[in-house]
Image: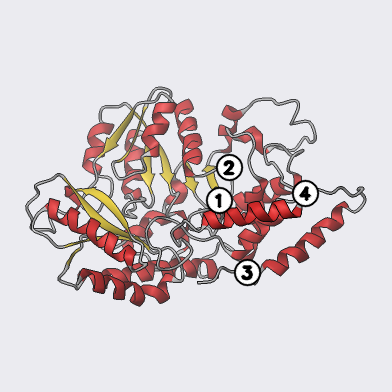
Amino acid sequence: MTLETKSLPLLFEALTRLEEGFRALPDVDLAGDMDELQTVLMAVAERMQDNYPYQHPLYAGQMLKPPHSIARLAYMLSLWINPNNHALDGGRASSAMEKEAVTQIAAMFGWESHLGHLCGGGTMANLEALWISGRLNPGKKIVASDQSHYTHQRISEVLHLPFQSIPCNSKARMDLDALEAVLKQGSVGTVVATMGTTAAGAVDPLMELLQLRAQYGFRLHADAAYGGYFVLAENLDGDTRAAFDRISEVDSIVIDPHKHGLQPYGCGCVLFKDPSVGRFYKHDSPYTYFSSDELHLGEISLECSRAGASAAALWATMRMFPLTRGGKFARGLEKGRKAALILFEKIQNDSRFFTAFAPELDILIWAPRGDKASIISKRSKALFEAAASENLHLAVATFPKVLFQEAWDIDWDEEDVACLRSCLMKAEHMEWVNPIWKVLDKVAG
């Protein structure tokens, strides 16, 4: 394959336009020695060849989606300025772009009033959300499904807050009976609802969690780092659609534009429904917060220096692809989901494979058949290697037997089983389902 370079002339044109804003300044040579630059840059290019082809549709393993050309170009363009969105003095234009972009993301979830900002990724965004939860419910427990991201437990340790993992059910969603048993103990301050687990793409039952919140009075945080943008998709199944339709009722939301939002790493976003939580961020930085009486983003963020380039890239992308149902961006999400459903149907109808449940978003899991859990795990890893040798890159994930014990009549000689996992998050996967299946059919044979 060839890398996309047709858009590069636009970057030079945009740099010329950017330069016009600084013509009053005397010239300064910042390029350096061109021969040395070339030598080092070519070395970087050679080193970077040692990567899986993340940008290609035959890569369907981890959650790696190439940034759109507009995001890549806007990010690069901003690097000639290198703004810092901590304070307005360091990133005036990019701070305004960040505020506009975050407002659009909040509106996607149905929030007109909110407090939020961009950050380095889902881990930092979740840290801020759980930090606010800890300030509002000091010393109280944080709970999340055992299929939630491992970051929640680590963050709880950092915040010195107790954490408890809640078992999942056979659809990889949080088990409500197990949750309620913990809630009855009266020690829970925050429940994390995962809106798209990174392993199985499962969406926790938000409607029921809202009912439990009304009864037990905890804070409800939606970790939508992976699945948040699917609020725009129109081809979700009933339970999943119903969950996303109620996401505006939670207390805080995390979403990662660097996953489905077509952005370069790292670009996360944290949102709070109640803007008054900003009081917990209050601090002063007299050597940075001096240029304006407007809100500096560092005043509502735990992070200090943050790349304004991320805000410029996100703003540009959302200018080109508005966050609306039925729009071009939403259609791209729907294509990935449809590709996952088509591939799932092919696998489900093939006697060489086990499946358990249909994908809720665009992640599907399955395994080669075997009569023991240990054998299935061994065959999953072998098939992973065989597919990679044919340039089809999948992932291997380990799951508890509760997800499969009702569907698979096997000897559970081990409590966990390794399965194959595919993440069909690129819109192009829709056209590549058959080539992917062709490789799977070959290596499984």
Against 311, residue 350 (above or below) is below
Distance in Å between CA atoms under marks 3 and 4: 24 Å
- Amino acid type, label 3: Thr
Residue under numbered circle 4: 32
- Amino acid type, label 2: Gly
Mark 3 or mark 2, earlier in chain = 3
Distance in Å between CA atoms under marks 1 and 3: 33 Å
Report the front residue among 261 and 139.
261
Secondary-structure class at tag 2: strand
Q: Nearer the viewer, mark 1 or mark 3?
A: 3
Distance in Å between CA atoms under marks 2 and 1: 8 Å
- Amino acid type, label 4: Gly
Residue under numbered circle 2: 116
Residue under numbered circle 1: 106
Instruction: Find residue 5 and name its label.
Output: 3
Mark 2 or mark 1, earlier in chain = 1
**Tags 4 and 2 in contact by the CB under 8 Å rule?**
no
Report x, y in % for residue 395: 32, 56
Residue 163 shown left or right of residue 181 in the figure: right
- Mark 3, other Cα within 10 Å: few <14 / some 14–19 / many ≥20: few
Res. 186 in view? yes
Distance in Å between CA atoms under marks 4 and 2: 39 Å
Report x, y in % for residue 399: 23, 49
**Tags 3 and 2 in contact by the CB under 8 Å rule?**
no
**Tags 3 and 4 in contact by the CB under 8 Å rule?**
no
